[in-house]
Image (spheres, helix red, strand yellow):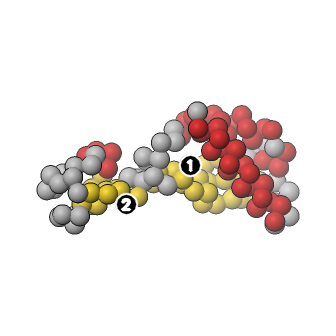
Amino acid sequence: MHELSVVFHVIDQLEEVAKENDVKEIKTVTLQLGEVSAVLPWYLTDCWNWAKKKHEIMQDCEMKIEKIDAVTFCEDCKQTYETVKHGKTCPFCGSGNTFLVQGNEFMIKEIEAI
């Protein structure tokens, strides 16, 4: 259920940017969402469609989501691999000495406004 609080945070940020830039209407917002960010895209969209109607400046605003693939780096063999497919264990050398390089992000990438 944290998707709703995430949506409210995004809306707060958008309203702040709109106020600072004398924006009358926000048409689209593009979010970058990491593959392992623990945010469910379909639920985020449902929450967005409900919450945006409560804010005049973004009543018709479309939310776009760009997925950022999860990538893990192995410190032993120095290779990267797909996190979701292989988890914490490196598929190249079998090491667990790994860390996530990307894929847990949640960012506002772009706003289209008038």
Residue 102 image point, x, y percent = 41, 58
Could you tell me residue 106's position as x and y percent? 54, 53
From the viewer's side, name the closer residue of 52 and 62. 52
Horizontally, residue 35 falls left or right of residue 30, namely: left
**Viewed as shown, does residue 62 lie left or right of 38?**
right
Q: Measured along the vertical axis of the image, is residue 61 above or below residue 53?
A: below
* Image coords of residue 78 (percent x, y): 22, 66
Confirm whether residue 76 shows in the render.
yes
Q: Secondary structure at mark 1?
A: strand
**Which element carries disc 2, helix, strand or loop?**
strand
| Residue farthest along the front direction in this orientation | 97
Is 88 located above or below residue 99 in the figure?
above
| Spot occupied by residue 27 in the image (x, y as percentages of width and height) | 74, 52
- Residue highlighted by disc 2: 101
Residue at x 63%, y 34% (from the top left corner) = 46
At 17% across and 64% down in the image, what residue appears?
Answer: 77
Q: Please, what is the three-letter code of the amino acid marked with disc 1? A: Ile
Marking on residue 65: 1
Precedes in sequence: disc 1 or disc 2: 1
Residue at x 75% of width, y 41% of height = 52
Q: Quadrant of residue 114?
A: bottom right
User: Which residue reaches farthest left?
Assistant: 93
Q: Is residue 101 left or right of residue 97?
A: right
Tally the numbered discs. Answer: 2
- Is there CB contact under 8 Å for labels 1 and 2? no
Q: Residue at x 27, y 49 (%)?
A: 88
Return the residue nearer the eye: 49 or 40.
Answer: 40
Task: Report the Cα–Cα distance between label 1 and label 2.
Answer: 20 Å
Is residue 6 shown above or below 72? above
**In the rendered image, the vertical position of residue 61 relative to residue 24, given as above or below:** above
Rate crowding at label 2 as few (under 14), some (14 to 19) or many (20 or more) other CA atoms within 10 Å.
some
